[in-house]
Image (cartoon, rainbow, N blue to C red):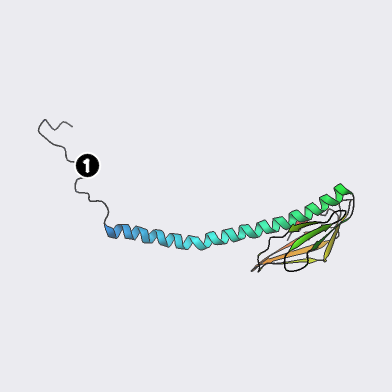
Amino acid sequence: MNYGAGHRRAPLFFGAGGFSLFEVLAVLVILGIMAGTATPTVGRIFDNMRFRQQVENFSAVLRYGKLVAVTRREVVALRLGEGDECVFVLSGAVEESRDCDLDEEDVLTMAPGEIFFYPQGTATPALLTFEKGERVKRIRLDLLTARPRFE
């Protein structure tokens, strides 16, 4: 549009004064409510991830026990360590320890108290039960394949 030489254009936002304090506060309150409802969910997600990671670590120790027995061609025993700390102890030609990385309220039980891995790739059947608060996960060690299976 051509307004002519003497006509001045009005700014596009003429009369718009921005946001009022009330509008800004309302948006902040809404964002605060959304963040407050999301925070517990995010915390539970991290707890679940930690729980799954610990269960995977236990499973990895069982697979490692089988691997050591097969590669060294000797019987390897796996038992939980003594005392308050949870330590997996692999004993064969060389004794080796792996930390369980448990929190104080976590409970790990192993039945029977000692698992044997054989050079043929088999193992004594066993059941590991891991409890973290209300969550419980069981890992059963298969007799013929020595593979951990989750229940």
Confirm whether residue 147 shows in the render. no
Q: Of helix, strand and loop, which one carries label 1? A: loop
Compared across the picture, whether 15 is left or right of 22 comes to left
Residue at the location (74% across, 56% down)? 59
Residue at the location (62% across, 57% down)? 49
Confirm whether residue 109 shows in the render. yes
Q: Nearer the viewer, residue 73 or 21?
A: 73
The residue sitting at the left extreme is 6
Q: Position of residue 108 (x, y in %)?
A: 73, 66
Quarter of the C terminus within the rendering: bottom right
Compared across the picture, whether 110 is left or right of 10 comes to right
Q: Position of residue 10 (x, y in %)?
A: 17, 40
Q: Quadrant of residue 76?
A: bottom right
Compared across the picture, whether 134 is left or right of 93 comes to left
Residue labelled with disc 1: 12
Q: Position of residue 96 (x, y in %)?
A: 80, 55
Q: Quadrant of residue 117?
A: bottom right
Q: Nearer the viewer, residue 97 or 113?
A: 97
Q: How many marks?
A: 1
- Vertical placement of 120 versus 112: above or below? above
Q: Residues within 10 Å of mark 1 (few under 14, many from 20)?
A: few
Quarter of the N terminus within the rendering: top left
Residue at the location (28% across, 60% down)? 22
Q: Position of residue 12 (x, y in %)?
A: 22, 42
Residue at the location (32% across, 60% down)? 25
For badge 1, the amino acid type reads: Leu
- Vertical placement of 59 versus 110: above or below? above
